[in-house]
Image (tube, rainbow, N blue to C red):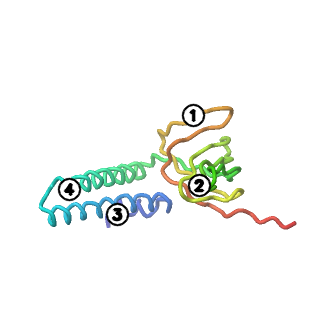
């Protein structure tokens, strides 16, 4: 058995999911590039698919390499506040209370309820900015729900 596969299976599930999604989409785009090129016979129409495949495969490969080297940090904390956008009330930012302090990150597409515990995976060299006692992170590897919010009984 390949030693890399054993290490991959030991990675946290959110990082495994990110790697599989990026490499899987990259392979799908590579196949789409081939289909478009074969169907039209014109390389010019297929080049965007090749560029996207290259980006996704490179991104997935780099994430895989980083994870195999152990160059990531896992922070857990409770979601203290969810700031939403205008009329549609989509989540924009999460304020996470960790042992290191308050961390503000972009919410992405998934809403996380206030009070839930999340696991935030950062690269070792992630830029962290401090403003008014809150650490701001503009890019992260993965974000997952570690525990649902505790229900209060009144």
Pointer 3 or 2: first along the chain: 3
Dot 1: element: strand
| Badge 3: residue crowd in 10 Å (few <14, some 14–19, many ≥20) | some
Pointer 1 or 2: first along the chain: 2
For this orientation, the residue located farthest to the right is 154
Pointer 4 or 2: first along the chain: 4
Q: CA distance from mark 4 to mark 3?
A: 22 Å
Mark sitting on residue 24: 3
Q: CA distance from mark 3 to mark 1?
A: 33 Å
Pointer 4 or 3: first along the chain: 3
Nearer-the-camera pick, 122 or 27: 27
Q: Quadrant of the N terminus?
A: bottom left
Identified at 62% across, 38% down, the residue is 135
Dot 3: element: helix
Name the residue beneath numbered marker 4.
Answer: 45
Identified at 21% across, 57% down, the residue is 46
Q: Position of residue 7 (x, y in %)?
A: 41, 59
For this orientation, the residue located farthest to the front is 87
Mark sitting on residue 119: 2
Q: Quadrant of residue 50?
A: bottom left
Pointer 1 or 4: first along the chain: 4
Q: Quadrant of residue 99?
A: top right
Pointer 3 or 1: first along the chain: 3
Dot 4: element: helix
Q: CA distance from mark 1 to mark 2?
A: 19 Å
Q: Are marks 4 and 2 in contact (CB under 8 Å)?
A: no
Q: Is residue 62 left or right of residue 143?
A: left
Q: Are marks 1 and 2 in contact (CB under 8 Å)?
A: no
Q: Quadrant of residue 103?
A: top right
Q: Position of residue 104 (x, y in %)?
A: 62, 43
């Amino acid at each position: 058995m390949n030693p890399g596969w054993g290490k991959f299976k030991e990675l946290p599930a959110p990082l495994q999911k990110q790697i599989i999604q990026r490499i899987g989409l990259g392979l799908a785009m590579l196949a789409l590039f081939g289909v478009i090129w074969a169907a039209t016979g014109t390389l010019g129409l297929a080049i965007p698919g090749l560029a996207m495949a290259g980006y996704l495969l490179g991104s997935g490969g780099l994430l895989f390499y980083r994870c195999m080297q152990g160059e990531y940090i896992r922070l857990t904390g409770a979601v203290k506040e969810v700031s939403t956008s205008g009329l549609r009330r989509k989540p924009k930012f999460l304020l996470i209370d960790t042992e290191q302090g308050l961390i503000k990150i972009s919410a992405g597409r998934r809403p996380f309820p206030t009070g839930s515990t999340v696991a935030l995976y950062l690269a070792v060299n992630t830029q962290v900015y401090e403003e008014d006692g809150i650490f701001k992170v503009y890019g992260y590897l993965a974000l997952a729900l570690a525990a649902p919010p505790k229900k209060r009984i009144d």
